[in-house]
């Protein structure tokens, strides 16, 4: 049997998967019965020619992000992520519902979530201060940056070191300009992967993993809500709100939905101003979305 070599999945390209093996890229197919491979997966491959191979095995994952797919199924987006950086800005309008959705998913998947407020050079940031403070009070780290003005980029680079991270956020918040500020030769790297794998320029909608110059890896995944609430239950969503966690045991009924159930400790705390009412109302909206 051909020797098995360990590799890292860096991109999906059309029908093939780009796997980095000892500083070179192989275009790989997967063994038929294998699960769907995700960017960030550590895999075992066999080489079939100079720049081609086959993925024989997916090594155990420490985390997995999924997005909704057809027929109520889910599809993996990225694996082995340490931190999700939720990027948002004052323009376009700041979608706190989407931020809460991302944070709830992170809480349930044991992935650290970090908030990144981009475009801090814009003047209308003051309007968000109170809302942003609520997240910081819950213990979420927040970076205030501007990709355009190079504000806070050095601190963000330092934070991304020694880990695999992914940027998430709605369109237009500046994820691409942030990625370009962090990886100056991003286009060059993208073209190199395409060249080796004979796919021409790949303007992929799938995720791609880049090595950061100062250390660490960043998975760039275009798309708005790349991971949804598809595989989440109501109790998991409630657990996804940090301020709800100490209250969940205090509800009168163990199957409390925290909507208008009798003796709900979460609703009572929101009404008493002990936890943020805006977050509680967004929780109710997410329940409807599910």
Image: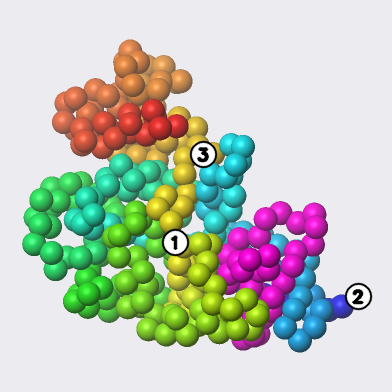
Q: Quarter-wise, where is residue 201 in the image?
A: bottom right
Label pair 3/2, CB-CB below 8 angstroms: no
Vertical comparison of 28 with 136: above or below: below
- Specify which label sits upstream in the sequence, 3 or 2: 2
* Nearest-to-viewer mark from 3 and 1: 1
- The answer to whether residue 137 is left or right of residue 52 is left
Q: Give the range drawn in magenta.
A: 10-39
- The answer to whether residue 34 is left or right of residue 180 is right
- Element under disc 2: loop
Q: Where is residue 149 in the image (x, y as percent from the top left)?
A: 19, 76
Q: Mark 2 to mark 1: distance in Å?
A: 39 Å
* Image quadrant in which the N terminus is located: bottom right
What residue is rendered at 48% in x and 67% in y? 219
Inspect the magenta stretch and tell me whether residue 221 lies in it.
Answer: no
Q: Where is residue 211 in the image (x, y as percent from the top left)?
A: 48, 79
Q: Quarter-wise, where is residue 148 in the image?
A: bottom left
Q: Colour scheme used in the picture?
A: rainbow
Q: Where is residue 12 in the image (x, y as percent from the top left)?
A: 60, 66
Q: Mark 1 points at which residue?
A: 222
Q: Mark 3 points at which residue?
A: 230
Q: Residues within 10 Å of mark 3 (few under 14, many from 20)?
A: some
Tell me the number on the disc at residue 1. 2
Q: Mark 3 to mark 1: distance in Å?
A: 19 Å
What is the number of callouts on the image? 3
- Element under disc 3: loop
- Specify which label sits upstream in the sequence, 2 or 1: 2
What residue is rendered at 34% in x and 46% in y? 98
């Amino acid at each position: 049997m051909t020797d098995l070599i360990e590799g890292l999945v860096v991109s999906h390209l059309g029908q093939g998967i780009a796997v980095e093996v000892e500083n070179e890229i192989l275009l790989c197919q997967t063994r038929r019965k294998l699960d769907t491979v995700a960017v960030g997966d550590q895999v075992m491959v066999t080489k079939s020619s100079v720049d081609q191979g086959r993925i024989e095995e997916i090594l155990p994952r420490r985390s997995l992000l999924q997005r909704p797919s057809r027929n109520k199924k889910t599809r993996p987006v990225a694996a082995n992520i340490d931190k999700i950086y939720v990027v948002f800005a004052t323009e376009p309008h700041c979608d706190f519902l989407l931020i809460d959705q991302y944070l709830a998913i992170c809480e349930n998947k044991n992935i650290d979530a970090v908030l990144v407020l981009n475009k801090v050079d814009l003047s209308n940031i003051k309007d968000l201060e109170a809302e942003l403070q609520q997240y910081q009070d819950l213990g979420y780290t927040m970076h205030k940056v501007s990709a355009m003005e190079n504000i806070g980029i050095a601190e963000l680079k330092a934070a991304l070191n020694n880990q695999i991270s992914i940027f998430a956020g709605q369109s237009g918040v500046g994820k691409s300009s942030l990625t370009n500020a962090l990886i100056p030769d991003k286009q060059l790297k993208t073209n190199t992967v395409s060249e080796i794998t004979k796919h021409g320029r790949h303007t992929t909608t799938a995720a791609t993993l880049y090595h950061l110059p100062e250390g660490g890896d960043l998975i760039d995944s275009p798309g708005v809500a790349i991971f949804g609430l598809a595989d989440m239950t109501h109790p998991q969503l409630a657990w996804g709100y940090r301020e709800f966690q100490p209250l969940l045991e205090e509800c009168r009924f163990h199957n409390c939905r925290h909507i208008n159930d009798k003796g709900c400790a979460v609703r009572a705390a929101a009404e008493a101003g002990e936890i943020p009412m805006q977050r509680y109302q967004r929780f109710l909206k997410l329940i409807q979305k599910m």
